[in-house]
Image (cartoon, grey):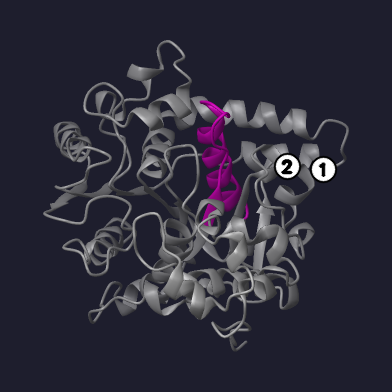
Amino acid sequence: MIYKPRFTKKQSFQEIQHTGPVQRASANLFPARWLERIPPQHAQYTMEQIEREDTMEWGEPFLADAFIECADLLMETEQNGRFLFVSLWDVQKTGDLMANRGYIPDAGLNNAQGVWLFTGDPAVDNTAFAHTSGSSSVPPYPTSAASKAQKSHPYGLPAVVVCPGGGYEMLSTYSEGVQLAQRMERDGGYKAFVLNNRIAPNYYPLPQMDLALAIMHVRAHAAEYGINPSQIAVVGSSAGGHLCASEALLYQELAPKVLEELKKQGAGTQQIQKVLEQYQAVSARPDALGLLYPVVSFQSEYHEGSYLNLTNGQPGLREKLSVESHITSDYPPVYAFANADDTCVPVSNTTRLDTALAQAGVPHVCEVFPTGDHGVGLGYGCSCQEWSEHMLAFLEGVFA
């Protein structure tokens, strides 16, 4: 199926935003905080005008192309069925992929009903991210991220669950979700899933349970998704990195909580027993981790916002959720990077993780680049711009 963008910068923000599912769901993919950068009096402006006159909170021109791309993805979901929003805590939908077709959740559902995976529909275009990728996700250098052997996948595609950052108070779903999924599918040969997990005031263990369920869902439906159930990576940015790293640490504790919550959510339904059997048969352990400028520790030189938003100050969690203090030899292999000039999450989070992984004998690569600060996503134009190339090469070795 050929991807043909529907919207252009010649159209007004209001025209695009009021089309089909875009009005109620655009903030699922393009953060609501970013949309607020367009003042109400500019709603009639074309996206070209908005790009010239409005700015992002960090001073760059408004991301008009990104907004248009997200609107297009929603239209591809509704009209061509190219993507799925898989509702994870809805027992009917998590147990039956077909029940998700045509489903587009409203934006802003910060509850169990708002926990979903966004992915290509295997019945239409299993690697849809690879075929709808925007130019900003294309590396500005020749890429040989994955070898031909890696892309042959005789036992199914490797999978990646992408966890956007946002300090456990928002989710940067476009730059740390959609764009990473595009890169992983197009250049790495993966099947990608973008996770929308719960955030504050939903405290630990709810976000970690959301990721555990996501891994269990992908593994339980491996045959339908065409993936290798023993090659599931999780990749997270900033607080999303902490989500991945902590879930990998606590997955055995989280899985029974997930099953118990599913049982509650599905009480009285005919599907509940089937779903419980599906998920009891699989592990919530990721097979590898990719961590972008991650929050790792809550004990020293940590990100206060992530700590408060995840724990609400609950006693005992500061030490329990400081990942570097608990790593053992059976922890999954890790690729991580940070920038030395990060003014948000101290780079020591990554260097302490490096030390802990080395002491435990866990295969890993932890890199520190000189500049780029925080929240750079793919980081093209920064000193870290080849981090995704390095991660894909590392994961190829893990999954060889």
Q: Residues within 10 Å of mark 1 (few under 14, many from 20)?
A: some
Magenta residues span 194-221
Percent across and percent down for residue 137 are: 38, 72
Say which quarter of the image contains residue 299.
Answer: top left
Residue 65 seen in this snapshot: yes
Nearer to the camera, 247 or 21: 21
Mark 1 residue element: loop
Amino acid type, callout 2: Val
Mark 2 residue element: helix
Q: Residue at (65%, 31%) from the top-left corner?
A: 259
Say which quarter of the image contains residue 59.
Answer: bottom left
Residue 127 seen in this snapshot: no
- Is residue 379 shown left or right of residue 184? left
Q: Which mark is residue 50?
A: none
Q: How many marks?
A: 2
| Residue annotated with mark 1 | 271
Say which quarter of the image contains residue 344.
Answer: top left
Classify 335 as above or below 253. Answer: below
Q: Residue at (30%, 42%) from the top-left corner?
A: 294
Classify 8 as above or below 34. Answer: below
- Is residue 7 shown left or right of residue 247? right
Percent across and percent down for residue 337 are: 22, 50
Classify 394 as above or below 304. Answer: below
| Residue annotated with mark 2 | 275
Amino acid type, callout 1: Gln
Percent across and percent down for residue 230 are: 45, 52
Labelled pair 2, 1 in contact (Cβ < 8 Å)? yes
Is-magenta flag for residue 202? yes
